[in-house]
Amino acid sequence: MIPMNTRNGFGQGRRTSLLPRSSKSGRGRQIGLALASTIGWILSLAAFQGFIDIRTLLQSDDDWFRDGLIFINHDVRLTDSIGVTSTNVSPKSLAKIRAVPGVSIAEPILRNHFPAAVQMGGGPIPAISSEVFLEAIPPELLSTGHEDWSWNPGDEIVPILIPRQFLNLYNFGFAPGKGLPPVSESTAKKVRFRLITYPYNGDAPVFYTASISGFSDEIESLLVPVSFLTYANAEYGDTATTGVGRVAVLLNDPDSKAFHKLLEDERLRAGKGTRENARLRILLDLCLAVLGTAGGIILFLNLLLFLTEAESLLADHRDRIRKLFFLGHNPTTLLRRLVGLRILAAVIPAIVGLVVLWWIRHPVATFLDESGIAIDPNPSPITVLAWFVLLLLANAWLLGRIRNRLLRLYR
Amino acid sequence: MIIQLHKLQPAYLSATHLNQSEVWQHDLTFTAPEGILLWGPSGQGKSSLLRILFGLEGKYTGEVRIDGQFITSQAHRIWPKIRNRKLSFVPQDFQLFEGESGWKNLDYLPLVAEGIDRALLQQWSERLGIDSLLDRTPETWSYGQRQRFCVLRALAKPFQWIFLDEPVSHLDPESSRNTLDLILSECERRQAGWILTQQTPDSTLPIGRTLRV
């Protein structure tokens, strides 16, 4: 019941309501509406937060490459192993790749034409030495923010990008076997190590200082800037070494049939990571869109039900409201009484929805963390902001509609 | 409090009616405390004029000002204040809350005049002859009782002008006299103006002006 706040109180006994509850709005109906609204909020917020989480996970700071980048190379066959055929990608194949619709860039990946090794030691990193294989991809294939990842002759440090798997191998294979502590990514980035190049012509090895710029799940070799590898190949490499072993391709449509047919025809193989990521992202986006749409529809229907209920209350009490206006009651007072409880009924489920999201996120974050996926245990500030804006807009719309209906009765 | 009419003309009255009128299409100023009798046969717009002055009717041309303020714009902002504190109205359609007792009906007033309490209203209702029906619902009241209750309700709230639309049309002469006496004495006490409508110009009331509508 909406309590009356008269200044007189001539009538004795039970207080009179200015606008008694509509016969259509029973307690059960109110509870049903509140539950539906809460579910709508939870679904919408979970979908929105999930969308942000996936974006954050798939587009982390270590996302060094542009979306749609694929590395391709030949499948190795027995004839390649005995030297009858070559694993190089021929200029003809490269031209065909470039001609496929949807391929915007297709550039050979540079490789080292000289022996190279890295040597580490000191600090938390124990002494390790290993021969390495270096590659470089054109800077235009690097993602925004990494375009300036480069090296110039005379620079003190050669920046290197390392497959994350290398660090995992160290932390979970090499280090436990040697009784050494694991090393985090941030610690590894602080370590300087030696990059040793062995000139092909037999000259004395040349030492460079190298530093890890980042880690990536999308590469299988050590990546150095094109400028360094071009310089080093020219200085220390075997000039007779030619041919393209691997090609970096920027493919707009990861499911391009023409592209995959070409791979099949040319006996080429694409690195799955990016394509799988893209597919996974599309699938997850689709699931979240379905979830979010369902939540959005529930919320919208709920809002309409609130509006319908308010309008039915207005319709039921049209004559009564006109009489109250006749006596001098202010439309604002009536509006406040009319929407007060309804706004409360709309706000409480929204708050419950946000709290539930907060509450279930902690165990979900713990579970994912155990699976090696780190997400923030608290909802993102953007989610909270979106919640607030949506709540504000929805209720402002509701209030505006009811106010218009009410003022129409004033004329 | 001043009410000003400038060339007021309802949308639905014929030219003949308008030409006979001393109100429509004229410039008039009513200043409280003043007693004004508006008379005219049925259909001349007596009730319409009071409804316009109370903001219930919008189909007219010309201007109305209350204390210098135009009343046509922002109706929902202006009228609650005016109806609450400056004007009171005894309408012909009563505007009662059926199914609720007389006392409960009085509870719906958002504001009551200073010094008005249950005891005084009880006293007035006895004077009006409706004391026995305040605990009953309006469905059980006669038209005359409804009229007198509306007078009681109109007097209970603050006002500087009171509009009385044929307030005693259903009453016997003695009840009429008692009712009008109470109204006029309250108007005098509050220094308020009144506008009363009836079908003939005859009256024993202390009228300031008599105008044919």
Image (cartoon, coloured by chain):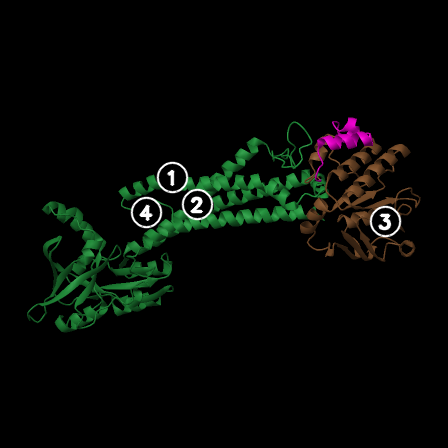
Chain colours: A green, B brown
The chain under label 1 reads A
Please tell me which residue lies in front, A335 or A300.
A335
Q: How many marks?
A: 4
Amino acid on which the number 3 mark rests in the picture: Gly
Give the quadrant of residue A80: bottom left
**Which one is nearer the viewer's eye here, A116 or A322?**
A322
The answer for how far apart the CA atoms under marks 2 and 4 are is 16 Å
User: Which amino acid type is shown beneath numbered disc 2?
Assistant: Leu
Residue at 37% across / 56% down in the picture?
Answer: A255
Image position, residue B195 (x, y; %): 83, 46
Q: CA distance from mark 1 to mark 2?
A: 13 Å
Residue at 38 percent of width and 51 percent of height: A52
Tell me: A408 left or right of A127.
right
Q: Residue at x 70, y 33 (%)?
A: B117
Q: Earlier in the sequence, mark 1 or mark 2?
A: 2
Please give the chain letter of the residue carrying mark 4: A
Residue type at the position of mark 1: Trp
Depth order, front residue of B89/A303 = B89
In percent of width and height, residue A328 lies at 70, 43
Tell me the kind of residue under disc 4.
Ile
Q: Earlier in the sequence, mark 1 or mark 4?
A: 1
Check residue A45 in the rendering and tell me which mark sits there, or answer none: 2
Secondary structure beneath disc 3? Answer: loop
**Which element is circle 2 on?**
helix
Q: Which mark is residue A359?
A: 1
Inter-mark Cα distance, 3 to 4? 75 Å
Above-or-below relation of A252 to A200: above
Query: What's drawn in magenta, residue-wise?
Result: B113-140
Q: Is residue B182 visible?
A: yes
